[in-house]
Image: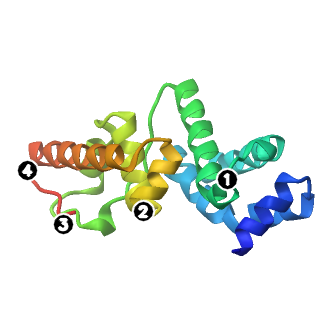
């Protein structure tokens, strides 16, 4: 049994130290998620604090201890989406796919514009796949969908992103 699963089981059973250990283990992943959605270090730190509180309150609802990371990321994504809805604006990490094969003739602004032009689900799948480097199975667990559905959505998201970038005269090499 891995360390995170053992910590999860202990946390579910009320062990506060185990819960803090889990948060310590995943705080960087959670922070990166918040930063990619909120585009502000201050807001990302606030999000991390709020998600820690929310996770602590609901840790007993975690049904599968081995999925604690995807469970925590889902809480973070939901929180960030709520914040963005309140602001009525969308902000995205400029460099998200830059290291994943975007042609050099695209400026970061073109990439950001193309990502912002995508629907929420496409942006979320691309973020989980390329920013967090999650496997299809983990994305499926996070989004609570079958793996086949995630593969279809990922292909559509990449196709849409390519089209958005080609409208600006370039291409996406992912």
Foreground mark, 1 or 2, reads 1
Tag 1, which secondary structure? loop
Q: Give the residue drawn at x 51%, y 49%.
A: 141
* Residue 126, visible in the rendered structure: yes
Residue that badge 2 annotates: 135
Q: Residues within 10 Å of mark 4 (few under 14, many from 20)?
A: few
Among numbered discs 1 and 3, the one appearing first in the sequence: 1
Residue 70 pos. (x, y %): 58, 54
Residue that badge 4 annotates: 169
- Give the quadrant of residue 135: bottom left
Residue that badge 1 annotates: 64
Q: Are marks 3 and 2 in contact (CB under 8 Å)?
A: no
Among numbered discs 4 and 3, the one appearing first in the sequence: 3
Residue 53 pos. (x, y %): 80, 44
Please give the label number shown on residue 54: none
Q: Are marks 4 and 2 in contact (CB under 8 Å)?
A: no
Tag 4, which secondary structure? loop
Residue 90 pos. (x, y %): 44, 35
Residue 119, above or below 2 = above
Q: Are marks 4 and 3 in contact (CB under 8 Å)?
A: no
Quadrant housing the N terminus = bottom right
Marks 4 and 2 sit apart, C-alpha to C-alpha, by: 30 Å
Quadrant housing the C terminus = bottom left
Please give the label number shown on residue 104: 3
Q: Give the residue drawn at x 16%, y 48%.
A: 165
Q: Residues within 10 Å of mark 2 (few under 14, many from 20)?
A: few
């Amino acid at each position: 049994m891995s360390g995170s699963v053992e910590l999860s089981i202990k946390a579910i059973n009320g062990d506060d130290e185990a819960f803090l250990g889990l948060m310590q283990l995943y705080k960087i992943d959670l922070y990166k998620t918040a930063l990619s959605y909120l585009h502000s270090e201050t807001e990302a730190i606030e999000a991390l604090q709020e998600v820690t509180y929310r996770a602590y309150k609901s840790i007993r609802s975690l049904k599968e201890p081995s999925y604690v990371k995807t469970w925590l990321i889902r809480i973070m994504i939901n929180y960030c989406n709520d914040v963005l809805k309140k602001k009525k604006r969308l902000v995205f990490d400029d460099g998200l796919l830059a290291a994943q094969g975007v042609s050099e003739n695209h400026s970061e602004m073109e990439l950001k514009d193309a990502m912002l032009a995508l629907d929420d689900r496409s942006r979320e799948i691309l973020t989980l796949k390329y920013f967090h480097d999650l496997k299809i199975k983990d994305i499926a667990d996070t989004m609570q969908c079958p793996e086949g559905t995630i593969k279809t959505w990922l292909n559509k998201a990449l196709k849409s992103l390519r089209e958005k970038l080609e409208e600006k005269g370039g291409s996406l090499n992912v």
